[in-house]
Amino acid sequence: MSSGTSDPRRLDKARRMRNFGMTFEDFTSDYMSVIGMLFSMFGLMMRMKWCAWIAIYCSCIGFASSRIQDDAKQIFSSYMLSISAVVMSYLQNPSPMTFPFTQ
Amino acid sequence: MRSSKVFTLFLAATVLLSVFQLVISKIDQDEDEDFSEFDDDFDEAPVRSQKSQKVEKDIPETEEDPVVKEPEIVKDKRGNGFDDDEVVVEDDDFDGIDEDDFYDEERKRDVPPPKLTITPVPMPMRGWQAYWSELLVIAGIAVYLLNYILGRYKNQRIAQAFFEINWNLLEENFAVLGDSTKLEDDQGTKSYHKLSDSQFQMWCSGRVCCEGMLVELKLLKRQDLVSILSNIFRPQRDLVRLQVEMSKEDMDSVVFAVANKKSALKISKECNDLINYCPDKRQGDKYGLNPQLVVMSELGEVATGILDSKTTTVINKFAHLIESIHISDQFSGLRTQDPEISKDGVLKMPEVRRFIFFTFALPTSTGGNNAEEAAEEIKPLFQFVFYTIDRLKRFRLTREGKQKADKNRAKVEEAFMKQTHAARAEAAAVRRDEKRRQEKERILQEDDPEKQRRWEEREQKREKKRKQPKMKQLKVKAM
């Protein structure tokens, strides 16, 4: 089914990788870093602990969806921001987390 | 670029936060100062009792240790002051104490009281049970990270199995495997490249009839728990896509696609060439294919020519694994790409390339346990790919078909030119103005006034000439 007896390989026809017709694009990592940042800021300013915890989740999802070529600094800073949001919320108010719809 | 934008956003947010905190601390200060006016107006004892009561009320709300200490200190002093006998006798002492009190309170605003011995007050006894929500969240994060490690390993195994099983076939067909830009010699890396934890690719080149082939694997995001949960509601499959770029002389004017219904909807809306050349979709059973499949073709003879008996058999056998087969000599990208971005896109047609896209679904389970079996199952389809490439090299349209195809292409080009006519005219006008401005600058820089005058006269004549033809046209129309 392939090419019969002749060898289809041609070394002189070897080409470098060009930009492709279609690529599988995935922007989850970028969206998650922005959303994580928003939740961290919200958690810090409005003193809502659950926002800070969701920011940690967003950082985790962004990290899992990241591409190899992505800058590790962005993921790291996203994690640090969300962890600092959680730590500062608990330092200011060590009581357990409350959800807005339960109280 | 994206990271610098994010960094700027973060900086702005930090500045905002610090300003906000400053404002909050100032408000607290003001609240303290609000009560200072009462200190002088009324008697000290009732005022202090008021203050201590207020401070006592604050204990359950704020729970800060220094605050707990204050009422005790004030109470002690108050205890001294309320004794009636002592009020008369110890007037001076009372006054002295008052002054000391005020002095201390005034000093408190300027200097923090470090000499106070704060006895450690234990935290309110809550126990770990009160923090159940935090423990739940931390457990969730641990589960997520565990799933990340497991999912990443599973995807890696699937990719490895796929490339290992099909390696021989690829080696037989291509001289260079793996992207050779990274190595000094042109032998290629002989391995696939990992783009992310769920995307893998390999570039193969060095074959007759094609410039190269890109093998892409887009697997389910098994490393992301959220994706796995969303897959329960919207099931997706692991995909393998082979993009073959054909040489110019190896492919005739063909625009053709076979896809299952879902993919057909998607590609018919996204790909420019299918939008321009294949407006109709036909059911697969008209060409002897599985009725689940849809055929889009520019010319009838193309469809019948490509779908020979062997091809039809293979397609029918693997219909459940075929997402789409898209053959095009006019591929110019996806519709989502804005044509206005590049200057060339506005002024002339976007570059067209000859591509064949084969998108297949890997029959792996969601858990990813049957990697080897799935790769074996898809091997015949891989061989079919090379068979199709070789056939297309030999496939030629009839004379009428070629004429029709050329006419279609000319029509599409004309439509594009009409659409961009306004934009092109504007670009030409801008270029003209720019040239004139440069000329004017050049003339002005020259010191010779004679030359300047002559140039200005020439410009005026040019302007008059430009305006004149319009008047002439109007005259003719009136008649």
Image (spheres, coloured by chain):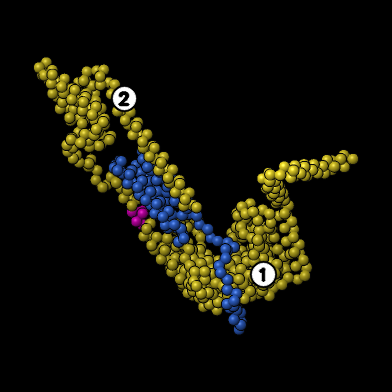
Chain colours: A blue, B yellow
**Residue at figure coordinates x 61%, y 57% from the top left:** B334
Mark 2 or mark 1: whose residue is earlier in sequence: 2
**Protein chain holding label 1:** B
Secondary structure, magenta segment, majority class: helix
Q: Amino acid at mark 1?
A: Lys
Res B307 seen here: no
Kindly identify which numbered label has been placed on residue B248.
1
Q: Which residue is mark 2?
A: B34
**Residue at figure coordinates x 35%, y 44% from the top left:** A49
Q: From the viewer's perspective, is B260 left or right of B107?
A: right
Q: Find out whether residue B16 is within the magenta segment.
A: no
The answer to which image quadrant residue B257 occupies is: bottom right
Query: Which span of residues is magenta-colored?
Result: B139-143
Q: Nearer the viewer, residue B312 or A50?
A: A50
Residue B416: x %, y % from top left = 71, 55
Q: Find out whether residue B141 is within the magenta segment.
A: yes
* On screen, residue A98 above or below B401: above
Res A77 seen here: yes
Q: Amino acid at mark 2?
A: Asp
